[in-house]
Image (spheres, helix red, strand yellow):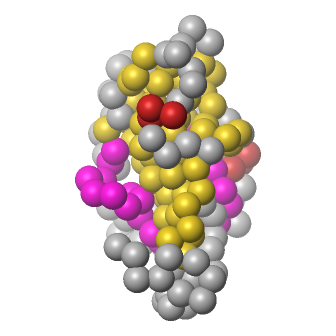
């Protein structure tokens, strides 16, 4: 099992609060462009090699390659490494860690910056009790690029329970 603290070169940040819409952010900062590595409304992948919860930014290609290998450890051959220009961008990663069933998800929804920090908005989803879900173990991970910044990064999260039959 790889622990988040063992991923060299990855700046970790501790999740602090809940958030769903960027309008709810009370930072007074400027919105940043967020380019998710997968289009759509769900995480980049439901299955990964990250069994622990991770909230992090990657600011260099060496750490990006190492993290990519860990994320894709279950897949042979692994998908090609998405190119990132670290002169201009950095990678944001949000991983839920291992979950006992399907129905869990995490999505990077937006980012803002102020003079002190960059704040990343996340949405975590879980199935309501009693909902029918696949018994497959999952490890949801979402990935996005945002403009490179030397500022500290903090994460704001909103947890959502998805009712049975909800889209």
Instruction: Pinpoint residue 130: horizontal percent, then vertical percent.
Output: 60, 89
Which SS does the magenta portion mostly show? loop
Q: Nearer the viewer, residue 105 or 4?
A: 105
Q: Residue furthest left?
A: 39
Looking at the rendering, in which quadrant would you find the N terminus?
A: bottom right
Q: Is residue 1 above or below residue 85?
A: below
Q: Is residue 125 above or below residue 27?
A: below
Residue 50 forms part of the magenta stretch: yes
Residue displayed at 49% across by 46% down: 20
Q: Is residue 27 visible?
A: yes
| Residue 23, quarter of the rendered image | top left
Q: Is residue 66 above or below residue 148?
A: below
Instruction: Pinpoint residue 110: horizontal percent, then vertical percent.
Output: 42, 36
As drawn, is 113 to the left or to the right of 88?
A: right
| Residue 80, quarter of the rendered image | bottom left
Residue displayed at 55% across by 61% down: 160
Instruction: Pinpoint residue 145: horizontal percent, then vertical percent.
Output: 38, 35
Which span of residues is magenta-colored?
Answer: 36-56
Residue displayed at 55% across by 43% down: 19
Q: Nearer the viewer, residue 128 or 106?
A: 128
Looking at the rendering, in which quadrant would you find the C terminus?
A: bottom left
Q: Residue furthest top?
A: 115
As drawn, is 148 to the left or to the right of 129?
A: left
Instruction: Pinpoint residue 112: horizontal percent, then vertical percent.
Output: 47, 24
Residue 10 forms part of the magenta stretch: no
**For the image shown, how many numbered marks are present on the structure?**
0
As drawn, is 134 to the left or to the right of 32?
A: right
Q: Is residue 67 visible?
A: no
């Amino acid at each position: 099992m790889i622990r988040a603290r063992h991923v060299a070169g990855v700046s970790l940040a501790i999740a602090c609060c809940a958030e769903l819409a960027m309008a709810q952010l009370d930072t007074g900062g400027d919105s940043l462009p967020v380019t998710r590595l997968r289009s759509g409304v769900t995480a980049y992948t439901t299955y990964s090699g990250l069994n622990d919860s991770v909230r992090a930014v990657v600011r260099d290609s060496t750490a990006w390659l190492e993290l990519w290998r860990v994320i894709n450890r279950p897949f042979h051959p692994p998908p090609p490494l998405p190119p990132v220009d670290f002169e201009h961008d950095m990678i944001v990663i949000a991983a839920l860690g291992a979950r006992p069933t399907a129905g869990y998800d995490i999505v990077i929804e937006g980012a803002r910056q102020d003079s002190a920090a960059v704040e990343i908005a996340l949405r975590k989803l879980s199935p309501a009790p009693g909902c029918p879900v696949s018994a497959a173990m999952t490890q949801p991970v979402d990935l996005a690029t945002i403009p490179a910044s030397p500022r500290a990064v903090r994460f704001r999260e909103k947890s959502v329970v998805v009712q049975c039959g909800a889209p």
